Amino acid sequence: MKILVTGATGYIGGSVATRLLEAGHHVVGLARSEPAAASLRQRGIEPVAGTLNDYGPLQRAARAADAVINAAQADNPFVVLAILPQLSGTGKVFIQTSGSSVVSTYDNGEYVDRVFHEDTPVTPMPEKATRVAIDEQVLRAALDGVRSVVIRPTLIYGRGIGVDSSSVQIPRLIEQALGGVARHVGRGLNVWSNVHISDVADLYLLALEHAPAGSLFYAENSEASMKTAAEAISRMLGLGGRTEDWPIEEAAAVLGPGAHLTFGSNSRVRALKARKVLGWDPKGPSLLHEIEHGTYKDQHRRRDA
């Protein structure tokens, strides 16, 4: 298949694109600059010059593809507005990358006994309302002859296999801990489901092949509190597992206002349909192992070398 991947130079999109190539597909990636295009060519991905806001190139690339995977800017409604009409009535696949932060609330590091699965209704906080509306629009495209799918990954970790190999949340916590103390928002009792990047890539390929039109899937394989993650970071950095509470106001000043719905929130989901409908069987190493003995430990060693 000829598959257009937006975000092919990113962490999720790059890993998915690489797995698609390994499976024998022809992959086309959107490139906003010549260096980005060159990085795609080096990996065997056909670059298309343009950005997510360049409707002409994006629409032409979507029409020419057998399937489209949007792995860039989950909160940008114009991407789906540009692409979905090009696929209407074709039965082609469109996979939208969302995220489990849509179920987050302002918890300030406290535990909340609330777990979502694919059929649980979601009433998002204002910051995530646009993302949920986009997800719903994609799912409704099934009524217009598009095999539309939404995937909501949880906290993703591990080394990517594309152009950008680095995840987001854990490296940011490690970076701030390099100052001598690992921190967590509030008491750090808030819990996030998590999933290894290799398992995420597997899920995309399964969805491409087998997902029914109008499907929503979460991607998770475990969960951990932010305090547990911070303790693992502390041990990895030789700080003895000690951590400190971090008032949300101070955390937001360092990590940005998004800290409320990422580092300070609960995001607990279960990928029931991914396992039952697609036969997804995640097997990647655990988050704590990757921090203390795997990817993030290796990155820290190379940094110190």
Image: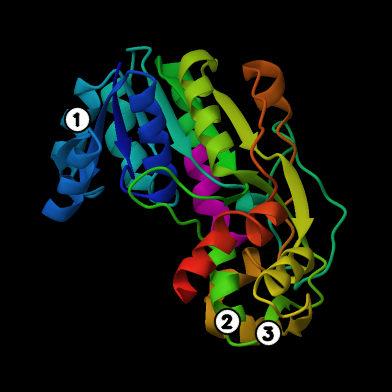
Q: CA distance from mark 2 to mark 3?
A: 7 Å
Q: Are marks 3 and 1 in contact (CB under 8 Å)?
A: no
Q: CA distance from mark 2 to mark 1?
A: 43 Å
Q: Badge 2: how crowded within 10 Å, few (<14), some, or many (20+)?
A: some
- Residue 29 is left or right of residue 192, and the answer is left
What kind of colouring is applied to the model shown? rainbow
Q: Disc 3 residue type?
A: Val
Q: Which residues are magenta?
A: 125-135
Q: Badge 1: how crowded within 10 Å, few (<14), some, or many (20+)?
A: many
In the image, is residue 130 part of the stretch drawn in magenta? Answer: yes
Percent coordinates x, y for residue 100 in the rendering: 63, 48
Marks 3 and 1: which is nearer the front? Answer: 3
**Res. 33 in view:** no
Quarter of the view holding residue 218: top right
The foreground one among 193 and 127 is 193
Give the answer, above or below, for where 229 lies relative to 280: below
Instruction: Mark 2 or mark 1: name the one nearer the start of the chain.
Output: 1
Q: Disc 2 residue type?
A: Leu
Residue at image location 46% in from the left, 32% down from the top: 138
Q: Which residue is mark 1?
A: 61
Label of residue 178 in the image: 2
